Image: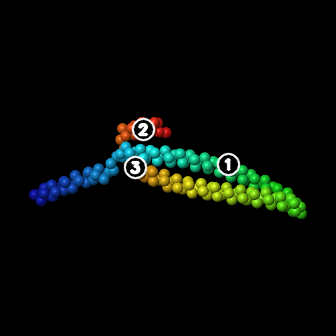
Amino acid sequence: MKRLAILTLLALPLAAGAQYSYRDYRDAPMTRGELRDCMERDLYMRDRLSILEQEKRDNDREADAIAREGSRLERERARLDNTNVSAVADYNDRSEAHNRRVAEHNRRVGDMNARAAAHNREAGEVSSLCSTRTYYFRDLDAVRRDYGTLR
């Protein structure tokens, strides 16, 4: 019985330490400067995203126009008199211009996709650095006062 009491007394500090281990490892709340940095990065990321979204809409509109032009060229080709050298040469010129437009469009879309991938990587970094940390509301209020109303 005496051994059980001693073992219980020895185990109590271990159990108490286990209860507080979560609190010991929890990150401290963000400083006001860290919160400001996170908010600035978030605003920057939102602005970049809206630019990328507009560029995507523009590219989609151009892709639709290219598709319509391709269909028109296909209809012309179906009606083309292959014995008329001048008509074939004119068609080939329009077709080559169309192919250059398609290649330029594909280059722009590839560039935009690379920027979108970079944006997504950076957004992931911002999220991992900023969204998992706590902060004090008084710091949030102070940062908002410093910048006016942040979106």
Quote the CA–CA distance across marks 3 and 1.
38 Å
Say whether disc 1 or disc 2 marks the residue closer to the N-terminus. Answer: 1
Q: Secondary structure at mark 2?
A: helix
Q: Earlier in the sequence, mark 2 or mark 3?
A: 3
Q: Residue furthest front?
A: 146
Residue under numbered circle 1: 61
Whole-Å distance between the Cαs marked 2 and 3? 23 Å
- Please state which of residues 11 and 40 is positioned toward the viewer in this rendering: 40
Q: Which mark is residue 132?
A: 3
Q: Position of residue 94 (x, y in %)?
A: 79, 57
Q: Residues within 10 Å of mark 1 (few under 14, many from 20)?
A: few
Relative vertical location of residue 89 with respect to residue 24 in this rendering, above or below = below
Quarter assignment of residue 96: bottom right
Q: Position of residue 125 (x, y in %)?
A: 45, 53
* Residue at x-position 36% and y-position 46%: 30
Disc 1 from disc 2: Cα separation: 40 Å
31 sits to left or right of 108: left
* Badge 3 amino acid: Thr
Q: Which residue is mark 2?
A: 146
Identify the residue shown where x is 50% and y is 46%: 44
Residue 92: percent from the left, percent from the top? 80, 60
Q: Nearer the viewer, mark 1 or mark 2?
A: 2
Q: Amino acid at mark 1?
A: Arg
Rendered residue at 50%/48% (across/down): 45
Mark 3 Cα-neighbour bin, 10 Å: few <14, some 14–19, many ≥20? few
Contact, mark 1 vs mark 2 (Cβ under 8 Å): no
Q: Secondary structure at mark 1?
A: helix
